[in-house]
Image: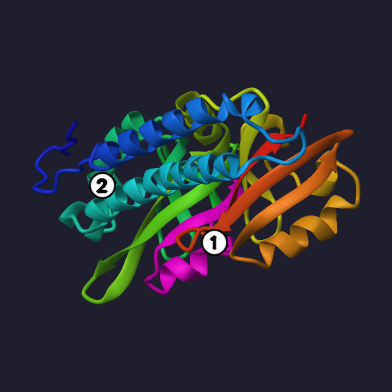
Amino acid sequence: MTMTASKSKHPIKIASYRNMVSRMVALITLASAMLATLPAHAESPTAPTKTASVNAQVALNAYQGLIEEHLTGVLRCIKVVAASPEAQSADWARTRPMLDRLDKELETDASVWFAMPDGKYYSTSADGLTEQNLGDRSYFSQLMAGQDVEGDLVVSKSTGHRSVIVATPVMANGKVVAAIGVSLRLRLLSQFVDENTQLPANMYFYSMNSDALISTHRNIDRMFKHPTDIGDESLGPIFTSALAKENGRLDYKLHEKNISAIFQKSKTLGWHFFIAWQDD
């Protein structure tokens, strides 16, 4: 679908990334079907075969790609808006029709916002100017320095939802005059992945930022928690060590169950992505 703001010459192609997403979903579905047959081929109940590792890696690559492409697709859309005369005017009334349409089209957003250099911002969820200020957000200085933001985890000021931020500065005459951002709901993002992965019942996906805060999880009740909030203190050093690496494998115990996982770091988001399974 193509979104076009009234009287604007800058169409917003919200579906530009859907072909990539479809390919990622197909890869995950294939890997999941293969993983579902693993118990029949395993050499031992606690040692997955080489085939298991390969199939888990396919699922991991596809899961990570699905998240990255979704967030990057959103970033592409708001960069198109940021390049428009409406946004460069730093006028909420002129820019709002484009942002309202974007808000309606995105399945995972909590709010689309338009921020001023002083931190005040307008939000589609607030139907205009909010009472909050973004000046104290760690990512705001990055935006005001002319840099994109992708992957910061916050509790949205305007909605209270656990969210991931995707945002871009609006430049006019070489200066930052505003910023456009989307607060994407992590619960909806996790549900989006779960609905498209069809992983076996004994497997799950999750991701963490550099502080070991869980950003997405098949069990959405575990989001925005640390491993030690879910299991015992022994998980702390295990995941601290994992997050210091680019990729690898983990074996740990959670709620008296033996869990194995493979992981890798996203260069785009700075998150680590995991595919885990229970060893019977």
Which of the pair 189/86 is nearer the observer? 189
Can you give x and y, in whole percent of width and height, for residue 98 in the image?
25, 41
Question: Magenta residues, as a range?
Answer: 134-158
The reply, left or right, for residue 44 in relation to residue 93 is: right
Can you give x and y, in whole percent of width and height, for residue 40 in the image?
63, 24
Can you give x and y, in whole percent of width and height, for residue 201 in the image?
64, 22
Question: From what the image shows, is residue 201 above or below residue 176?
Answer: above
Say what amino acid the circle numbered 2 marks: Thr
Residue at the extreme front of the image, as rendered = 43
State which quadrant residue 97 falls in.
Answer: top left
Question: From what the image shows, is residue 101 above or below residue 243?
Answer: above
Q: Is residue 158 visible?
A: no
Question: From what the image shows, is residue 218 above or below residue 234?
Answer: above
Residue beneath the point at 66% across and 33% down: 42
Secondary structure beneath label 1: loop
Report the quarter where the N terminus lies.
top left
Q: Which residue is mark 2?
A: 95
Residue beneath the point at 24% across and 51% down: 81
Secondary structure beneath label 2: helix
Q: Which residue is mark 1?
A: 270
> Would you call the spot at circle 1 few (<14 residues within 10 Å), some (14-19), or many (20 or more)?
some
Say what amino acid the circle numbered 1 marks: Gly
